[in-house]
Amino acid sequence: MTNLEFFKNEAKKFLKDWRTQTQTVESDGIILYHYNPMFYDIKGLFLYYELDDRDEKDKKLARAQHFIAQMVGFKKWDDLIHATEIELELAEYLLRKFKNAEEIMRWEQLTGAPGITPENAAELLDYAKYIDEMDERVRIPFLPSEQITILSGKPRINQLNEFDDEHNPGGTLRKDSYVFCPHCEKAFNFNQSKVIKDNSTNLTMVVCKNFPTCKGMYLDYKVLSHTILYGVAREHELEKGFDIFPNLSMNTKIECLHCGDKYIYNEAKAVIDPNDGEALIHCKNYPKCNGTLIDFMSSE
Ligand SMILES: [Zn+2]
Ligand SMILES: [Zn+2]
C-alpha cells in the first residue's frame, strides 16, 4: 500500500529547502534568489517551471505540495490525493529519483510527458524501471576490472541470444549481424561481442569485442546491412575470382576451409561489404560462415 504520508513528507522537505531562500538585488534592480537546499534542486526546478517573482516568494506548504504533484506528472495535489494505487506507486518511484530538473526533463522527453493516468501508470512504471536498469548497465564497462566478469560458454551465449528478441535498438540487431563499433572503428560479427557482468548486481552488458581496450557497447553499434547479390550481378562478381585463380571455373568443385563444406564454385555468394561498398566472394554458407574466396580450395 503506497502511503500518502510519503508525498506529504516530501512536500515538507521541498518547503524546507524553499525556505532557505535568500535574495540579492542586482545593480539594475533585478532580484536574484539563492537557495541552500538539502533535498531538492530548488533553483533548477523553479527555472524549469518558469516561476515568476511573486510565485518564487510564495513559500507555502500548499505550493510545495503542488510542485511535488507536478513533478511526477499530476496536474495538481488534489489529483495525487485521489490517485489509484498503481498511479501512486509510479509517482513514488519517480519522486525517489527526481531531485533535479535534469532528471524530470529527461523523463518528460523520453515519454512525451503524458501525465499519470490509471491506464498508463503500469506501463510507465515498467518503463521507468527499464531506464534505470539501462543506466546501471551502461556503467558496467567503466567499473574497476575486479568488479567485472567476462562471461564465456553458455551464459555468454544465452545473453547474446536475447538479442534475437526485441531487446535491441530498432530490432535490427541479430546474432548474425555485421556491426561497426564507432569507438574503436572496427567492424565485426555481433556474435563476437563480449558479454560482461557486474559482479555486485549480476546485471550484464554486451560490449565491443575489443573490450576492455574499447568501452563501446551494443547500444553504440551501427548495424551494417550486407547485400547478397543475385542473377547477373552475382555471376559477374564470381567471374572476378577467375582473375585471381586462373584454374577456377563455375563448375570447379571447391572446399571452404572455414566451414569444411564442399560444393561447386557457382554456389558461392557475392556480398557487398557495407564498409567500402565492394563486393566480396563469400562461402555459400554466408553469413553463418565467414569464409571468403581465399578460403576456397579445389577439392578435385
Ligand atoms: Zn569497439
Ligand atoms: Zn564456408
Image (tube, rainbow, N blue to C red):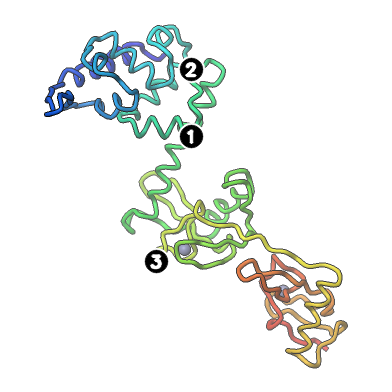
Q: Residue at x 37, y 16 (%)?
A: 69
Percent x, y of residue 153:
54, 60
Q: Residue at x 71, y 81 (%)?
A: 293
Q: Earlier in the sequence, mark 1 or mark 3?
A: 1
Crowding near the residue tagged with mark 1, few <14, some 14–19, many ≥20 C-alpha atoms within 10 Å: few
Q: For residue 86, which numbered disc appears in the image?
A: 2
Q: Nearer the viewer, mark 1 or mark 2?
A: 1
Percent x, y of residue 180:
55, 62
Crowding near the residue tagged with mark 3, few <14, some 14–19, many ≥20 C-alpha atoms within 10 Å: few
Q: Residue at x 52, y 23 (%)?
A: 122
- Does dot 3 land on a helix, a strand or a loop? loop
Q: Quadrant of the N terminus?
A: top left
Amino acid identity at mark 2: Ile
Q: For residue 110, which numbered disc appears in the image?
A: 1
Judged from this view, the residue extending furthest toward the right is 251
Amino acid identity at mark 3: Thr
Percent x, y of residue 86:
48, 17
Query: From the viewer's perspective, is residue 230 above or below residue 38?
Result: below
> In the image, is 195 to the left or to the right of 70?
right
